Amino acid sequence: MLMRTDPFREMDRIFQQLSGTTGTWSKPSVMPMDAYRDGDVYVIAFDLPGVSTEAIDIDVERNMLTVKAERRPAGKSDGVQMELSERPLGVFSRQVMLADTLDTERIEADYDAGVLTLRIPIAERAKPRKISIGGESDRKQIAG
């Protein structure tokens, strides 16, 4: 149901993790995701711990799904001295090319415990269906 758009994206993600760089709006970090089919629904889950729902942007244009989010540093008072900072901050983004068999008009989004979950129904036209076969009498009526 998904089509990979950039084979080097995973290498960029690993490099950013190892180098400790943060994402910017012009070069966002990649967010981890899972994708699977559950019956007649395709589910995509993105890890976005510590991101408020107001900082998440979900867009669909044609079959391109884009999710962007920004994790900002927590507000600290002037007397605070940071001893250790390992949680990544900055902008995160992921683009996913969706197959034509998905109904992008009816996407549902939920955000719980730092996980953004999108549910995309399988389009009716993509579901298997039975085709009836007409008999000889049906053909004679059509030919009329």
Image: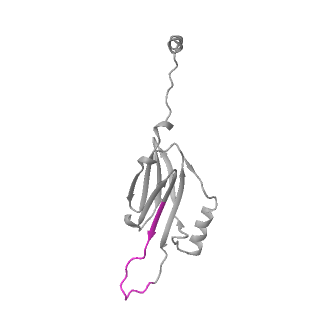
* Residue situated furthest bottom in the rendering: 79
Left or right, 85 with respect to 19, comes to left
Q: How is the image coloured?
A: one colour
Q: Position of residue 95 (x, y in %)?
A: 53, 58
Q: Please tell me how many numbered marks the rendered image carries.
A: 0
Magenta portion: prevailing SS class: loop
Residue 50, above or below 104: below
Query: Per the image, is 53 magenta?
Result: no
Residue nearest the observer in this picture, 112 or 133: 133
Query: Per the image, is 73 magenta?
Result: yes
Q: Position of residue 98 (x, y in %)?
A: 53, 49
Does the rendering let one see residue 31?
Answer: no
Does the rendering let one see residue 13?
Answer: yes
**Residue at the location (59% across, 54% down)?**
4
* Residue situated furthest left in the rendering: 77
Left or right, 119 with respect to 22, comes to left
Residue nearest the observer in this picture, 40 or 17: 40
Q: Position of residue 29 (x, y in %)?
A: 53, 68
Residue 41, above or below 17: above
Q: Quadrant of residue 10?
A: bottom right
- Magenta span: 67-82
Q: Position of residue 24 (x, y in %)?
A: 52, 72
**Residue at the location (46% across, 37% down)?**
124
**Residue at the location (54% across, 46% down)?**
99
